[in-house]
Every structure is written in structure tokens, then in C-alpha cells.
Image (cartoon, helix red, strand yellow):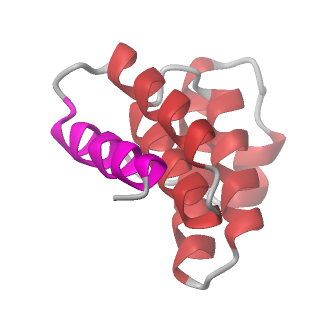
Amino acid sequence: MPFLPIKKLLSADPSHKETKNRLAMLYNNKGVSCALQGKKDDAIAAYKEALKNKEDFSEAYNNLGAAYVDKGLIDDAIVTYKKALEINPNFGEVYNNLGVAYTKKKGV
């Protein structure tokens, strides 16, 4: 799916499903970029924006969970990973991440 110029995308009808999906991908990608730069709070904010636009975006939930783990917010990460699995129970990476979160919670 090709990306529209950001200004055009942001000025499009925000209630249009395709617009919301593209915005969700844009914010998720921004979150990944922020996370790679160590900007944890910005990453979390971007993932939350992605999820406002697409509530069933399991990848964004997974990324948000990882950002929570990076900040030491393990309980938030666990809740977030479980939400990702509700949406996509076949998302194997989330099971691994959930296991890591539980391990960190127990201090193992």
C-alpha cells in the first residue's frame, strides 16, 4: 500500500477507514524510529496514536509492550501484550515478549 504525502494524508477525511489505517502505520513507524533513537516516551506516544486510529493493530500493541518493558513498566507491558494476542492469537513474537515480561516481573 503506497504512502500518501503526509500533509495530504493528514488533511484527508479522518473518519475514512483507509486514512485511519495509513495514519496508524505512520504512527507505528514513527514509534519504531523513536524507540531506535532511545526516545521511549515519544515512542509510547506514537504507538498510542497508532492505536487510536486502528484499535485492532496487533503490531502496534506489541511495539507498545516492548516500549513499556524498556521503561520498566512491566505490568503495563503484560496487559498490552495480552491485548495483542486477543487480536492475533497466532502472533508468535508476542508470546516470546510476554514470556520475557513475566520473567522480568519475577526478577529472574
Q: Nearer the viewer, residue 56 or 94?
A: 94
Which residue in the rendered view is the most extreme toward the right?
11
Q: Main secondary structure of the magenta part?
A: helix
Is residue 94 rendered to the left or right of residue 77?
left
Q: Which residues are magenta?
A: 91-106
Task: Judge whether 80 appears above or below 28 on screen.
Answer: above
Picture coordinates of residue 51 (x, y %)? 63, 32
- Estimate the x, y position of residue 27 in percent, counting from the top left: 63, 52
In the image, 58: left or right of 6?
left
Compared across the picture, whether 85 is left or right of 26 comes to left
Q: Quadrant of the N terminus?
A: top left
Q: Do we see residue 88 in this rendering? A: yes
Q: Residue at x 55, y 52 (%)?
A: 28
Q: Quadrant of the C terminus?
A: bottom left
* Residue 38 within the magenta-colored segment of the rendering: no
Q: Is residue 26 visible?
A: no
Q: Position of residue 86 (x, y in %)?
A: 37, 14
Q: Residue at x 32, y 48 (%)?
A: 97
Residue 81 higher or lower than 60, as above or below? above
Total count of labels: 0
Q: Position of residue 100 (x, y in %)?
A: 32, 52
Q: Nearer the viewer, residue 48 or 98?
A: 98
Examine the structure image and report whether residue 104 is included in the region drawn in magenta: yes
- In the image, taking residue 100 as reference, residue 33 lies left or right, namely right
Which residue is at 60% across, 61% downward?
31
Q: In which quadrant of the rendered view does residue 62 lie? A: top left
